[in-house]
Image (cartoon, helix red, strand yellow):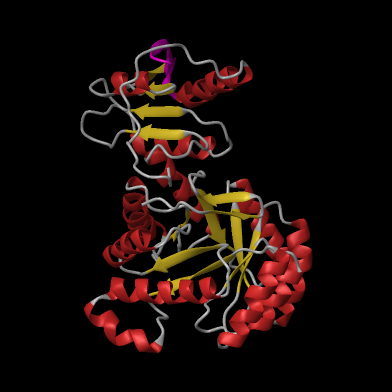
Amino acid sequence: MGSSRQISVGGVPIGGGAPIAVQSMTTTKTHDAAATLAQIGALAEAGCEIVRVAVPGLPDAAALHEIVATSPIPVIADIHFNASLALKAMDAGVAAVRINPGNIGGAERVEQVVRRALQTSTPLRIGANSGSLPEHLRPAATADPAGALVQAATEEVEILERLGFHDFKISVKSTSVPVMMEAYRRLSEAVPYPLHLGVTEAGTLVTGAVKSAIGIGALLAQGIGDTIRVSLSTDPVEEVRVGFEILKALGLRQFGPELIACPSCGRTNVEVHGLAETVETRLKAYREHFEVAVMGCAVNGPGEAGDADFGIAGGRDAGHIYAHGAVLRRVPQDRLVDELFAEIDRWIALGMPRPERGRRKLALPVVGAGA
């Protein structure tokens, strides 16, 4: 189940009962330090807690000094095939290094990386990916793809343990959600180390968000996993947003507002889709955690809007604004959103006081230390 060991990535605790950390990866060329730092800044603004940058060559490694010194969040260097780049990354002060012991150049090179990691107190991320399994495990992947991923990961674990190194986290990612879930379940029973969850190459925003929510969310609900990355073919800021939405939906983290919105149907007297999108866009400016309900009719609207911290229930020409279970007032439709946010801002300025009242919503019970 949840990992018993804990590591620290640039001051962010991973595993051993720490809050689930949200990661992403830059899409810029790392040797362009200015562009990379600009993207890291946008990710940090969205709430990203750890960022990974690709280091495929010497110019990228040379840029790490500036990036690490300026980045507002811990930087992980992503390195394959070249152990000397891992050494340079650690000398630059990165918070962690992602390597694959199987492709870094043999046992001697792995030992060089581990020795430097011990000297610099740099944690590592190791693990397997369904798209790059070692040659000797590819035949086994046909019959048991999850088993092949776990075997690849545990072989890497054994290498590091033989060298006396235990400061690492592990991933076993797959493009298949069922394979990924089964691999992480088996791995969680086999090792005590922190697990980095993700569905690799999940797809575009909608498809990738759905796959990630199912795969990552189901594992977290079982207490499996300590840090996550939602891999999307879009702006990486969206990865962070989806990651936090998964955690918020499970009751594991409280970060930013939570929007509750009803689907459009024939009962509504207002265009709920546009109203909800307007509210959601404005909510992105807030870091405080609170619930806002956007409802379109008198069937479920009053109940759901009243159960949230704030809510609006639309009507034909006017709607109601709710706050903490009480109707505040009826407002003309064209002023509904502005009046809602005026109430929210007033409440935040007062210190976000919440009156005692019954709550119908319960957080999902989560088993394991990963919660």
User: In this rendering, does residue 317 appear at all?
Assistant: no
Whether residue 38 appears in magenta in the rendering, the answer is no
- Foreground residue, 218 or 120? 120
Residue found at x 61% / y 50%: 12
Q: In the rendered view, tell whether residue 128 sits above or below residue 4.
A: below
Q: In which quarter of the image is residue 168?
A: bottom right
Residue 336 percent location from the top left of the image: 46, 23
Residue 181 percent location from the top left of the image: 31, 61
Residue 104 percent location from the top left of the image: 57, 83
| Residue 188 located left or right of residue 266 | right
| Residue 90 located left or right of residue 143 | right
Q: Quadrant of residue 317?
A: top left
- Foreground residue, 266 or 250? 250
Residue 146 percent location from the top left of the image: 30, 71
Whether residue 328 appears in magenta in the rendering, the answer is yes
Residue found at x 33% / y 46%: 221
User: In this rendering, does residue 337 appear at all?
Assistant: yes
Looking at the rendered image, the quarter that the C terminus falls into is: top left
Q: In the rendered view, tell whether residue 307 sits above or below residue 191.
A: above
Q: What stretch is highlighted in magenta?
A: 322-333
Q: In the rendered view, tell whether residue 197 sits above or below residue 160.
A: above
Picture mark count:
0
Residue found at x 66% / y 64%: 122
| Residue 64 located left or right of residue 231 | right
Dominant secondary structure of the magenta stretch? strand
